[in-house]
């Protein structure tokens, strides 16, 4: 789309994130007008001095057409917050990336996704567990999301591919900088059976500060995250924390209490994460009943699985209702109502009918 280069341009400006970009979009109506706005107009729109200075500097130094050409040269495409293709669950986050670089495909079925993460220094047990769960989830048409790192991540991607399913690899680098480099072949395979995704500009190297930001996208794309082998201080534990803050389910596989690689996962279970020993434990949590029919898997989404779903359904009817009203009437948090609505949409019980507006499809008694 013609306005993508302006989204790209603003994404390259320091201190212009989702909130300020939304402000500009609302004020000017079109991002090309915001990109060309004067200092006074930007101030009138509500921006502070430093972000305005950053925009003016970027406008004089960034060649938008050249930047778009860089993206095209990598074989990637851009999806913005204004696009229908932007992942719906990720879009709900207050810090959702304004622009995603994507190499591969995004399809509606990817809304049913689960993140699988863990230590880079995985044991054979951990790799086997990650592969087993990912393969089983893929066989039940669940997209597996991970970070292409050594150990648990790459085992999860391989399991999804071996299961004939879809998988997303979320990068902490530019989409042209596969890290670690030895996973380049797998990345290419993933792009044909899912997508490689990054919020970072072309050419961004693997810097430590990027990976926590990457982790919030892994959980943000997913209904929940499964932690397989994680020390107490690790990126996987950061992902678990972010998932909980986003209102996602956190699952953990129990491990050897004498192993440092399992202290994080065991601690998560102790603190309330859902202990899982089979993929059915995860599917049951989402109330998805699965059965094999010949060579394919059929899924059936049946009824409310918990009190939160029942409570939200009680306030839904044929007339659209805003999510803020659901929060007020149900007494639940925004995060819980948002995640619950996502599950109800996947079950075919509710649907989105406009910006943050929902209505009932059917109610089961």
Image (tube, rainbow, N blue to C red):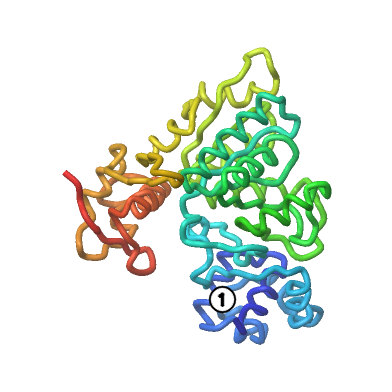
Q: Nearer the viewer, residue 268 or 60?
A: 268
Identify which residue is drawn at 68% across, 35% down: 152
Q: Position of residue 84 (x, y in %)?
A: 49, 70
Q: Quadrant where the C terminus lies?
A: top left
Identify which residue is drawn at 62% across, 26% down: 264
Identify which residue is drawn at 53% across, 44% down: 138
For the residue labelled by badge 1, is the local secondary structure a helix, a strand or a loop? Answer: helix
Q: Position of residue 308 (x, y in %)?
A: 31, 41
Q: Position of residue 351 (x, y in %)?
A: 32, 60
Picture layout, residue 101 above or below residue 39: above
The single residue placed furthest to the top in the displayed view is: 258
Q: Nearer the viewer, residue 299 or 226?
A: 299
Task: Tell me: 36 left or right of 85.
Answer: right
Is residue 122 at all visible to an observer of this figure?
A: yes
Crowding at mark 1 (Cα within 10 Å: few <14, some 14-19, many 20+): many
Identify which residue is drawn at 51% across, 33% down: 251
For label 1, the residue is 24
Task: Tell me: 22 left or right of 13.
Answer: left
Is residue 57 at all visible to an observer of this figure?
A: no
Q: Quadrant where the N terminus lies?
A: bottom right
How many callouts does the rendering have? 1
């Amino acid at each position: 789309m013609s306005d993508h280069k302006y989204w790209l341009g603003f994404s390259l400006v320091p201190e212009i994130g989702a909130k300020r970009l939304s402000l500009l979009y609302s004020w000017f109506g079109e991002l090309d007008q915001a990109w060309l706005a004067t200092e006074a107009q930007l101030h009138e729109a509500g921006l502070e001095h430093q972000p305005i200075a950053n925009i003016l500097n970027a406008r004089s130094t960034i060649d938008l057409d050249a930047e778009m050409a860089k993206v095209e040269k990598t074989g990637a495409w851009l999806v913005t917050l204004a696009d229908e293709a932007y992942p719906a669950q990720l879009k709900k986050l207050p810090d959702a990336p304004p622009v995603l670089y994507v190499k591969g495909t995004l399809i509606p079925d990817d809304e049913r996704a689960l993140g699988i993460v863990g230590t880079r220094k995985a044991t054979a047990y951990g790799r086997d567990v990650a592969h087993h769960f990912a393969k089983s989830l893929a066989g039940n048409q669940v997209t597996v999301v991970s970070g292409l790192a050594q150990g648990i991540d790459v085992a999860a991607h391989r399991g999804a591919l071996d299961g004939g399913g879809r998988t997303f690899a979320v990068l902490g680098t530019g989409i042209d900088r596969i890290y670690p480099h030895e996973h380049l072949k797998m990345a290419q395979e993933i792009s044909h059976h899912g997508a490689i995704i990054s919020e970072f500009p072309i050419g961004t190297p693997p810097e430590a500060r990027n990976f926590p930001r990457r982790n919030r996208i892994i959980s943000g794309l997913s209904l929940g995250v499964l932690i397989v082998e994680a020390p107490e201080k690790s990126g996987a534990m950061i992902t678990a924390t972010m998932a909980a803050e986003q209102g996602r389910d956190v699952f953990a596989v129990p491990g050897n209490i004498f192993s440092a690689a399992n202290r994080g996962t065991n601690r998560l279970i102790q603190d309330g994460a859902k202990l899982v020993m089979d993929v059915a434990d995860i599917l049951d949590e989402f109330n998805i009943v699965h059965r094999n029919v010949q060579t394919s898997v059929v899924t059936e989404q049946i009824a409310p699985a918990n009190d939160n779903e029942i409570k939200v359904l009680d306030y839904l009817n044929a007339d659209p209702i805003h999510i803020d009203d659901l929060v007020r009437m149900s007494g639940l948090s925004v995060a819980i109502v948002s995640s619950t609505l996502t599950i109800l949409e996947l079950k075919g019980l509710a649907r989105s009918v406009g910006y943050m507006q929902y209505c009932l499809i059917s109610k089961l008694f």
